[in-house]
Image: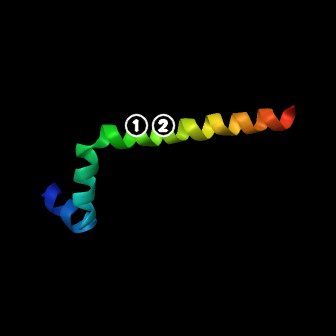
Amino acid sequence: MVDAMLEVMLGPLRGISDFYLDYQIYFNTIIVGFALYKILSSKKKTEETAN
């Protein structure tokens, strides 16, 4: 019953979510790495402008 409701509500997104859940560790690693890069690069810019 729940599976049928999800199929109707999500439609084609169901396949995308299955793909994401299969490779979740890789996607999360990329997202966290990008966030850390943005944080560290913004700190370097503020230090350079403060000097």
- Give the residue drawn at x 39%, y 40%: 28
Q: Nearer the viewer, residue 45 or 15?
A: 45
Residue 43 placement, left or right of 17: right
The single residue placed furthest to the right in the displayed view is 51
Q: Position of residue 13 (x, y in %)?
A: 28, 62
Kindly identify which numbered label has been placed on residue 37: none
- Give the residue drawn at x 24%, y 52%: 19
Cα gap from disc 1 to disc 2, whole angstroms: 6 Å
Kindly identify which numbered label has been placed on residue 33: 2
- Mark 1: which amino acid? Thr
Q: Nearer the viewer, residue 34 or 13?
A: 34
Residue 22 placement, left or right of 30: left
Q: How is the image coloured?
A: rainbow
Q: Is residue 14 above or below residue 21?
A: below
Q: What quarter of the picture does the N terminus occupy? A: bottom left
Tag 1 residue: 29
Q: Nearer the viewer, residue 18 or 9?
A: 18
Q: Quadrant of residue 49?
A: top right
Q: Determine crowd level at label 1: few under 14, some 14-19, many 20+ residues with C-alpha closer than 10 A.
A: few
- Mark 2: which amino acid? Gly
Residue 18 placement, left or right of 30: left
- In the rendered structure, are the residues bearing label 1 and label 2 in contact, judged by CB atoms less than 8 Å apart? yes
- Give the residue drawn at x 40%, y 37%: 29
Q: What quarter of the picture does the C terminus occupy? A: top right
- Give the residue drawn at x 24%, y 67%: 12
Per the image, label 2 sits on a secondary structure element best described as: helix
